[in-house]
């Protein structure tokens, strides 16, 4: 297999390097990158941490789909298994061509500023996350007790607390590609998580926080977000529900 | 004088311990900076799965629970090496620590009445492990991060700390490389906390993140603080065969069973009463014994069978485990057995601290996995490490706040920064070098795995120690080709290597000296516990280039030392 990797250094021009990788069973794209760094080029820069698909560090564009490198099996890519069909976004094509049966194309996450090789600056993503004030301000409860929370509420909350903030959705979103002010699927899913938390009980206040064109109303429901989410979080669903609730309130007035 | 950033409190590490300490300090109105080589949410705490122990006693069907029962289980689990006053603090404060996280927003799993659900865990006499499905660490870490970013704490992400600055016997700051720019920066502090986690990556088979290379412990040792009980390395019984990704103890807590190649539920021969829920050291040894005696499956693993739990229960309680099995070995636990093998998981040992998280060096504190209070002794119980991060993270923050007098601005001499710059330059200018850092790193992992694994024996360990030293002698030959200092991960790896060797040697020296079997430390040549000679903690000091071994008494308490049977 040829690993075709996007290379970039500040001030320079981007280029692609090709590294021959012996593929064995179970090899992930992250393993392939380690192999390339150890054997061919010790300057190859990419982020990683847990290698178990829980920390959200190694999201990158693999065969033009944002995915976690640690979770993506090379053999599956070469067999073209399980590739999600994404709605067109100009940002997903960085210009690198590849033969999907012989090559694996690895590029940095789009819609974020590239810093070196596959490393992107995540600050913009986290600034938008912070815009939704992701801190629970619960009602007072006795120190020695928990808030009571029905299992069904937990189930609904978990759909969104499972987000690992890897930015795969942010990079796949066609709206983010053309409207830099759109706060993006991850931040909106996070906001929805707080809105529906009965322990906080500020549902409407939370929903109204993003009642703007750059918030809930920016979404065009291409649904790339849910297709690329490595954790199955459905930001499109949260956004749809939030929009409906806000619309209903307006109509009732 | 070197250009510096000054903060009253510096916290190295943005995992649960570091963030919990930061929260406490900001509540005390202190100025705090958190330095981490990654974004805090990428810390290894995020990967913790099964849960966090607290004697809430929510599970009324199981009878009455108490913090004292929790303490007894912890002390027995530790093979009586834990300091019992520290264990009391851990278990007494557990309910409040867990409930606080719930109040801050953590979405824990619930029972039918809406209260926190609690599940059985290894070595525990009561179902007292609170959990958020099998993503407890993720949920806790996100909650704490959400809380701390609201405060005035400063975050320095992508900052790799390279050394502590000691002046007149006091820790007054640290040096760090800003990974993006590749530049060395100095930070000064009144109180500095090491919350850098474990060192699992000195082993080949580890559940740990790639980050966990142990430089926190090594830095403390280089600054003059001793490491305690380093020989006690926890091997988790169930890591996914091949990748060694953690398969939570919760899988067994929920009813999963272990089978060998003959489809025998072999735990009945090792722990007839507790079976799969015996403490980790015992289950890991049992699995390894089965494999070593030819009853493992080809390649060296056993089966974890969850099929009888059914799709619904697996989906609700163990969704992460199911996903990991699907993603990494293509096995659906609903339909097939999961291949598991033991792997390095946790370090009970670490930087010696008192119950207030202070080290022997004024100005230096440590908490969490990189420290050793000791609440885990010779073997940690599942669910007690997340608890330790919350309880001792808070205590560390409070102790630091007390130690800070305010107003004092330490100056950091140019010499210190120059010495660190020189280290970097030496690696970067080594044109004669014969190999990259990964070569020595692989060698180190191989030696630790083969010579200081689950079963240990003097001759093998002596060979291992010699091999470690000869590999370490090659540090000067490590070469980094990449000239650019920005995001130069090979340079970081080369810098980490020296510290990995220090930590590895501390493990080796402790393991050789302890001629007994206790908890996770099993000597085939000394197969029983020897309280007469070894009911004490091991301490390792670094004096110049030499490691010197010493010991300190175990603080016993209400629970008399007994035989440990499950």
Image (cartoon, helix red, strand yellow):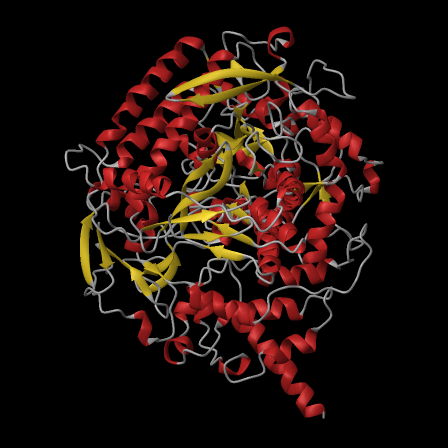
Determine the residue positioned at 63% across, 51% down.
Answer: B25
x and y percentages locating residue A7 in the rendered image: 23, 58
Question: Total number of numbered labels?
Answer: 0
On the picture, is B16 further left or further right than B242? Answer: right
Answer above or below: position of A229 versus B65.
Answer: below
> Which image quarter holds the C terminus of chain B?
top right
Determine the residue positioned at 35% across, 26% down.
Answer: B446
Q: Would residue B204 be seen by someone viewing this image from the given angle?
A: no
* Quarter of the view holding residue B242: top left
Answer above or below: position of B466 versus B472.
Answer: above
On the picture, is B160 further left or further right than B403? Answer: left
On the picture, is B416 further left or further right than B252? Answer: left
Answer above or below: position of B253 versus A63.
Answer: above
Q: Would residue B77 be seen by someone viewing this image from the given angle?
A: yes
x and y percentages locating residue B68 in the rendered image: 79, 31
x and y percentages locating residue A145 in the rendered image: 81, 52
Answer above or below: position of A117 versus B20.
Answer: below
In this view of the protein, which residue sits in the foreground, A8 or B134?
A: A8
Determine the residue positioned at 59% across, 41% down.
Answer: B307
In this view of the protein, which residue sits in the foreground, B171 or A10?
A: B171
In this view of the protein, which residue sits in the foreground, B374 or B74?
A: B374
x and y percentages locating residue B35 in the rendered image: 47, 50
Give the farthest residue toward the left.
Answer: B432
In this view of the protein, which residue sits in the foreground, B139 or A70?
A: B139
């Amino acid at each position: 297999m040829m690993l075709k990797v996007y290379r970039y250094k500040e001030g320079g021009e981007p280029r692609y390097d090709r590294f021959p990788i012996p593929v064995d069973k179970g090899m992930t794209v992250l393993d392939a990158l380690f192999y390339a760094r150890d054997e061919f080029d010790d300057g190859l820069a990419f982020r990683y941490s847990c290698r178990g698909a829980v920390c959200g560090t190694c999201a990158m564009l693999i065969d033009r789909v944002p995915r976690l490198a640690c979770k993506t099996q090379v053999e599956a890519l070469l067999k073209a298994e399980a590739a999600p069909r994404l709605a067109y976004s100009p940002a997903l094509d960085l210009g690198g061509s590849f033969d999907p049966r012989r090559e694996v194309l690895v590029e940095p996450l789009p819609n974020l500023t590239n810093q070196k090789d596959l490393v992107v600056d995540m600050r913009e993503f986290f600034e938008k996350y912070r815009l939704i004030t992701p801190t629970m301000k619960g009602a007072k409860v006795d120190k020695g007790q928990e808030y009571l929370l029905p299992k069904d509420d937990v189930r609904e909350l978990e759909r969104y607390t499972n987000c690992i903030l890897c930015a795969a959705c942010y990079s796949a979103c066609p709206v983010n590609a053309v409207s830099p002010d759109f706060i993006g699927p991850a931040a909106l899913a996070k906001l929805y998580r707080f809105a529906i938390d009965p322990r906080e009980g500020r549902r409407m206040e939370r929903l109204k926080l993003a009642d703007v064109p750059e918030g809930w109303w920016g979404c065009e429901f291409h649904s790339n977000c849910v297709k690329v989410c490595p954790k199955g979080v459905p930001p499109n669903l949260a956004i749809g529900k939030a929009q409906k609730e806000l619309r209903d309130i307006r109509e009732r007035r | 004088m070197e250009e510096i950033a000054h903060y009253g409190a510096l916290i190295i590490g943005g995992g649960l311990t570091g963030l919990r300490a930061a929260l406490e300090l900001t509540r005390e109105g202190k100025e705090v900076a958190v330095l981490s080589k990654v974004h805090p949410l990428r810390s290894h705490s995020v990967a913790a799965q099964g849960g966090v122990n607290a004697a809430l006693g929510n599970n009324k069907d199981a009878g009455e629970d108490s913090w004292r029962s929790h303490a007894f289980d912890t002390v027995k689990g530790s093979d009586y090496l834990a300091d019992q006053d520290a264990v009391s603090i851990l278990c007494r404060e557990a309910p409040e620590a867990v409930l606080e996280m719930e109040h801050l927003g953590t979405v824990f799993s619930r029972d039918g009445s809406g209260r926190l659900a609690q599940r059985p865990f290894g070595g525990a006499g009561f179902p007292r492990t609170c959990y958020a499905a099998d993503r407890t660490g993720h949920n806790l870490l996100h909650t704490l991060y959400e809380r701390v970013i609201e405060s005035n704490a400063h975050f320095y992400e992508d900052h790799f700390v390279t050394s502590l600055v000691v002046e007149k016997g006091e820790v007054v700051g640290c040096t760090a490389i800003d990974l993006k720019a590749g530049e060395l920066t100095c930070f000064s502090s009144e109180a500095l906390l090491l919350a850098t986690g474990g060192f699992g990556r000195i082993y080949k088979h580890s559940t740990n993140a790639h980050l966990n290379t142990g430089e926190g412990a090594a830095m403390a040792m280089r600054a003059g603080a001793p490491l305690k009980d380093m020989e006690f390395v926890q091997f988790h019984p169930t890591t996914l065969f091949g990748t060694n990704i953690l398969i939570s103890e919760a899988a067994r807590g929920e009813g999963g069973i272990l089978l060998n190649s003959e489809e025998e539920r072999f735990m009945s021969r090792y722990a007839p009463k507790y079976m799969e829920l015996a403490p980790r050291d015992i289950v890991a040894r049992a699995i390894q014994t089965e494999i070593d005696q030819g009853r493992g499956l080809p390649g060296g693993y056993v089966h974890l069978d969850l099929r009888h739990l059914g799709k619904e229960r697996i989906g609700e309680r163990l969704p992460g485990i199911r996903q990991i099995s699907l993603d990494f070995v293509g096995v659906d636990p609903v339909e097939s057995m999961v291949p598991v093998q033991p792997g390095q998981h946790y370090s009970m040992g670490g930087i010696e601290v008192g119950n207030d998280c202070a080290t022997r060096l004024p100005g230096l504190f440590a908490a969490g996995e990189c420290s050793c209070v000791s609440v885990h002794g010779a073997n940690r119980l599942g669910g007690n490490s997340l608890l330790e991060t919350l309880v001792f993270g808070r205590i560390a923050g409070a102790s630091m706040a007390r130690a800070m007098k305010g107003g004092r601005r330490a100056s950091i001499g140019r010499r210190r920064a120059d010495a660190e710059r020189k280290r970097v330059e030496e690696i970067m200018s080594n044109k004669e070098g014969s190999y990259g850092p990964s070569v020595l790193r692989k060698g180190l992992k191989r030696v630790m795995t083969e010579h200081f694994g689950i079963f240990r024996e003097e001759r093998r360990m002596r060979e291992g120690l010699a091999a470690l030293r000869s590999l370490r002698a090659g540090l000067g030959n490590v070469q980094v080709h990449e000239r650019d200092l920005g995001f130069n991960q090979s340079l970081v790896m080369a810098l980490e290597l020296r510290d990995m060797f220090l930590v590895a040697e501390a493990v080796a020296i402790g393991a050789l000296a302890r001629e007994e079997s206790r908890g996770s430390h099993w000597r085939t040549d000394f197969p029983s516990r020897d309280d007469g000679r070894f009911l004490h903690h091991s301490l390792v000091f670094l004096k110049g280039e030499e490691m010197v071994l010493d010991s300190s008494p175990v603080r016993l308490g209400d629970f008399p030392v007994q035989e440990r049977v499950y």
